[in-house]
Image (cartoon, helix red, strand yellow):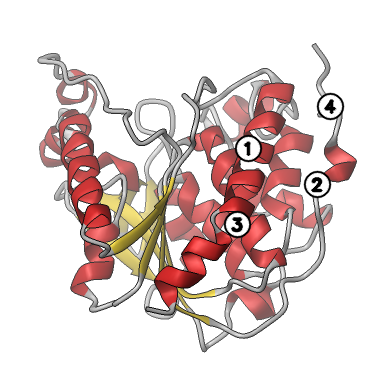
């Protein structure tokens, strides 16, 4: 098995053009399963679909960061070129960050390879929010780019997986994976009054998580019991969110894009070709959804 994706040079590049698209884009996480979302968003950026507001949970926040920066292909190239870089995932990650995945590689080191367009990312006409789990209270924090001390810390916390990653300080609060308490933050978009809400999922429509009576987080996070309870209940809450999204989609309230085929890629998938294939699935399905998306946005 090669460490280099065979079609890396075919990943599209460039800067998204065009004005802003009204509405809120909601991005689910899923670690490397967000290769699907990255494909969808690259297709949309190539077609001048640039949502005014973006909210992302976990790796969805990382994907949303590059989308906000209007950098076509950057998310995909970072993952497909670096999956076997031990400074990102591996021995050096454990040594430097005491984490399975060292997110500072994506947020800092990768800038030496492909600089993040911070001017676009901080465009005052757009809004970006990363969802973080507050480890003191177990509640979700909606970290707005323009109202938190350091949005990069919030993105890092949002994407930091429980059990295998240390907590991240976000404005003096210990934070971890936003998916611990809110895996798909569509309700925030509704409560904020957005009329058009577009959700990109990383699991097929029918997928639901297994709910178990086991409570592993309560043992690991015994000093953060509220967070442990939220984490142990997160699968059940995810299933309820998926049910609610299905109903909202039927009512025409939200527009949803999700993988058409069963996703058989793990959160830290080692098969680089499978990761690349998932990206292209997202890209093609993103293209195929454009006309229906435009119809939803215009009515």
Task: Identify the residue shown where x is 41% and y is 33%.
Answer: 204
Residue occupying the far top of the picture: 1
What is the crowding at mark 3: few (fewer than 14 residues within 10 Å), some, or many (at least 20)? many
Q: CA distance from mark 4 to mark 1?
A: 19 Å
Q: Position of residue 90 (x, y in %)?
A: 65, 23
Task: Identify the residue shown where x is 46% and y is 24%.
Answer: 262
The residue to which callout 3 is attached is 41
The residue to which callout 4 is attached is 4
| Whether residue 96 is situated above or below residue 143 in the rendered picture | above
Quadrant in the picture for the C terminus: bottom left
The residue to which callout 2 is attached is 11
Asked if the residues shown at circle 2 and circle 3 are in contact, with their CB atoms under 8 angstroms apart, the answer is: no
Q: Disc 3 or disc 4, which is closer to the eye?
A: 3
Q: Earlier in the sequence, mark 2 or mark 1?
A: 2
Q: CA distance from mark 3 to mark 4?
A: 23 Å
The residue to which callout 1 is attached is 281
Residue 45 in view of the camera: yes
């Amino acid at each position: 098995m090669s460490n280099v994706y065979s079609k890396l040079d075919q990943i599209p590049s460039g800067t998204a053009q065009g004005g802003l698209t009204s509405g809120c884009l909601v991005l689910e996480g899923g670690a490397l399963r967000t290769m699907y979302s990255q494909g969808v968003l690259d297709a949309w950026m190539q077609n001048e679909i640039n949502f005014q507001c973006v909210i992302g949970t976990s790796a969805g926040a990382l994907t949303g960061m590059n989308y906000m920066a209007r950098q076509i292909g950057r998310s995909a190239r970072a993952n497909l070129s670096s999956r076997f870089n031990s400074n990102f995932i591996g021995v050096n990650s454990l040594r430097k960050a005491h984490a399975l995945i060292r997110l500072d590689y994506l947020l800092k080191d990768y800038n030496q390879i492909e600089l993040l367009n911070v001017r676009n990312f901080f465009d005052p006409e757009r809004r970006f929010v990363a969802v973080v789990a507050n480890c003191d209270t177990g509640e979700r924090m909606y970290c707005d780019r323009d109202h938190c001390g350091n949005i990069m810390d919030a993105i890092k916390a949002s994407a930091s997986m429980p059990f295998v990653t240390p907590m991240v300080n976000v404005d003096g609060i210990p934070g971890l994976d936003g998916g611990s308490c809110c895996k798909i933050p569509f309700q925030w978009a509704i409560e904020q009054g957005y009329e058009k809400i577009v959700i990109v999922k990383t699991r097929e429509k029918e997928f639901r998580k297994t709910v178990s009576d086991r409570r592993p987080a309560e043992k690991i996070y015994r000093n953060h019991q509220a967070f442990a309870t939220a984490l142990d209940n997160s699968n059940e809450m995810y299933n309820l969110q998926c049910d609610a999204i299905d109903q909202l989609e039927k009512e025409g309230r939200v527009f949803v894009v999700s993988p058409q085929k069963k996703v058989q890629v793990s959160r830290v998938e080692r098969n680089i070709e499978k990761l690349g294939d998932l990206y292209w699935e997202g890209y093609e399905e993103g293209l195929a959804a454009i006309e229906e998306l435009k119809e939803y946005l215009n009515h």
